[in-house]
Structures are given as structure tokens and as C-alpha cells.
Image (cartoon, helix red, strand yellow):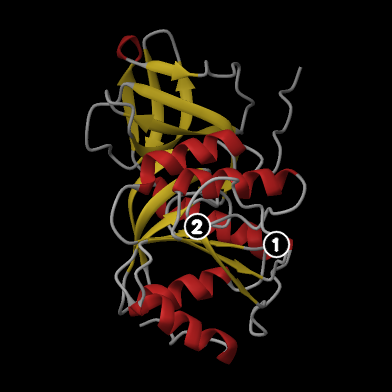
């Protein structure tokens, strides 16, 4: 069982107030390592919120390189991913893709939204686009004073201090979190797919390097992403993908800028691609 979440005293009354309130769509923004995830978990423990995760790198729910929707289990604190949209990057720089995916997945009903810690420079545009896409009742800004709010809307704003309990994560720890999210969702089976029935978006970068392979998403006839996978080969007649078995026939293979390399029988996320020899 997951350890009980410890919440700073400055947050307790606010969390109780929000849980009892009328806000149905809540988005939490702020820099990295200020306590956003802890705040969201504490809020979800008090009210049955769906979780929309707009951070493609440090995931609360879903695989890396995606915008995802799911739930936080009230007892264990674990997460369940119900849907995701592949944005093809673990960086918040893909602003338009994240905003479009947010619109697709926001849906109805009580929802709390996690966002990237990318808040300055282009990150301010990302947060503005995220708020506009979700159209929340309430924006909770943690550890940030200047909030890039959309010009139109009915959104209320609540400013909270950074949690004194929040711990700074090292780059190595952030890589580990991304890797663990990949491992949970990748699967191990290899699936052969008939090439003539598939569309690539975009066309695969060929030839592959000897070792590195691109991460991809497999989508159905309606364009809904069903699984992530490793593209092993793409020939004239078929492709081979390592993935969890998709629940419906695959029509589109989506590629982004995320590459993997083999490591100890598994696949490791790479920060950059090793150039092909020759």
C-alpha cells in the first residue's frame, strides 16, 4: 500500500475547500519540484476526479511522450490510464500538440489537470494554451506569481506557495521516472502488421541505426491511439512492432522524436539519436 501523502499545513485548508467546492475542472500549474503531483494526489483522495496529465515527460499517468487521461486509485494511490494521445516528445516544447490533445481528452465531469513544469519563455505560451484548451473553473498556481491566463474565460485563480516538503529531483532521477513509465506501458510481444493496411505519420526514418529504434503509437481506424511500441522493421510488405497487443486493428503508426536503444534486454529512452554508421 502506498504511504500516506504528507501535505504542508498551508495547503490543508485550501484542499478541503476545493474538494467541497463547485469547481468541476481544475488545472494545476507551476515550475518543477514545487509539489504539483502531491497537491493533485491529495485533492483526488478527497474527491473523485479524473486525472488529465499534460506533462509528456514526468508522467503521473500514461506512457512518456503522451498526453493522457486516467484516474488515481483512492486506496493505493496508483494510477490507471484510460486513454492517451501520442505527442511524440517528452518535452513541453510541442505546444500545439499538447493543447490539441488536451482538448481531445478533457471530456466532461470532475477533472484535475497536471501540467509540465516548463513555465518560462515558451513555457508561458504552453501554460496559456493548456489553460485555454481545458477551460477550467479554477487555476491553481503553485510556486509562481506571474500566471499566463487567457484573455477570455471564467477562470478563477488560486496562488499557493511552493511546498516546503517538495524535493528537487536530479536529471538522473527524472530520466528514471520517464524510463519507469515507458517500461510499464511498452509490453514485450512483437506484432507483425501487414504494410499495405497501414499509414505512417510521418514516414519512417530509414535506414534505422544498427541499435536505435523509434518509439511509436498504434492508432485504430478512428485515429485513437491504443498502444505505444518500438518500431523494429519496416519493409515493403510488413512492419514489426514490439508492443502490448492492441485491442483493435491497427491502421496508423505514429512516429515522433523519441528514440530507444537496447539495454539489458529492455529498451532505454535516449536523449538523442546515435548517428548511423557510414
> What residue lies at 32% left-to-right and 47% top-to-bottom?
107
| Residue occupying image coordinates x 71% and y 73% | 168
Q: Residues within 10 Å of mark 1 (few under 14, many from 20)?
A: few
* Cα–Cα span, label 1 and label 2: 36 Å
Q: Quadrant of residue 208?
A: top right
Q: Is residue 204 left or right of residue 43?
A: right
Residue 195: % across, % down: 35, 13
Return the x and y of residue 256 as percentages of the image width and height.
56, 30
- Image coordinates of residue 9 in percent, x first then y, are 56, 91
Residue 87 location, x and y as percent?
A: 52, 37
As drawn, 191 above or below 90: above
238 shown above or below 219: above
How many circles with numbers are drawn on the protein?
2
Which residue is under mark 1?
Answer: 172
At numbered mark 2, what does the secondary structure look like: helix, strand or loop? loop
Regarding residue 188, the answer to whether it shows in the image is: no
Question: 140 or 249, which is in the foreground?
Answer: 140
The local secondary structure at tag 1 comes to helix
Badge 2 density bin: few <14, some 14–19, many ≥20, Cα 10 Å:
some
Inspect this view and state whether residue 63 appears.
Answer: yes
- Mark 1 vs mark 2: give the one in front: 2
Kindly identify which residue carries mark 2. Answer: 155
Q: Residue at x 27, y 37 (%)?
A: 246
Amino acid at each position: 500500500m502506498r504511504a500516506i501523502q504528507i501535505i504542508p499545513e498551508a495547503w490543508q485548508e485550501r484542499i478541503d475547500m476545493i474538494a467541497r467546492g463547485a469547481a468541476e475542472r481544475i488545472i494545476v500549474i507551476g515550475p518543477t519540484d514545487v509539489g504539483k503531483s502531491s497537491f493533485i494526489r491529495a485533492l483526488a483522495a478527497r474527491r473523485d476526479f479524473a486525472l488529465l496529465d499534460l506533462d509528456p515527460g514526468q508522467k503521473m499517468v500514461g506512457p512518456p511522450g503522451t498526453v493522457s487521461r486516467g484516474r488515481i486509485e483512492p486506496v493505493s494511490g496508483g494510477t490507471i490510464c484510460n486513454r492517451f494521445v501520442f505527442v511524440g516528445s517528452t518535452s513541453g516544447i510541442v505546444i500545439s500538440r499538447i493543447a490539441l490533445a488536451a482538448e481531445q481528452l478533457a471530456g466532461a465531469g470532475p477533472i484535475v489537470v497536471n501540467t509540465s513544469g516548463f513555465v518560462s519563455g515558451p513555457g508561458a505560451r504552453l501554460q496559456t494554451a493548456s489553460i485555454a484548451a481545458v477551460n477550467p473553473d479554477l487555476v491553481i498556481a503553485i510556486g509562481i506569481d506571474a500566471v499566463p491566463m487567457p484573455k477570455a474565460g471564467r477562470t478563477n485563480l488560486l496562488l499557493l506557495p511552493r511546498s516546503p516538503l517538495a524535493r528537487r529531483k536530479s536529471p538522473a532521477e527524472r530520466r528514471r521516472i520517464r524510463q519507469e513509465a515507458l517500461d510499464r506501458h511498452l509490453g514485450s510481444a512483437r506484432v507483425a502488421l501487414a504494410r499495405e493496411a497501414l499509414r505512417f505519420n510521418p514516414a519512417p526514418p530509414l535506414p534505422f541505426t544498427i541499435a536505435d529504434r523509434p518509439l511509436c503509437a498504434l492508432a485504430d481506424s478512428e485515429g485513437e491511439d491504443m498502444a505505444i511500441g518500438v518500431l523494429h522493421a519496416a519493409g515493403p510488405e510488413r512492419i514489426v512492432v514490439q508492443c502490448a497487443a492492441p485491442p483493435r486493428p491497427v491502421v496508423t503508426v505514429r512516429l515522433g522524436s523519441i528514440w530507444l536503444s537496447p539495454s539489458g534486454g529492455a529498451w532505454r529512452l535516449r536523449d538523442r539519436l546515435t548517428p548511423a554508421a557510414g
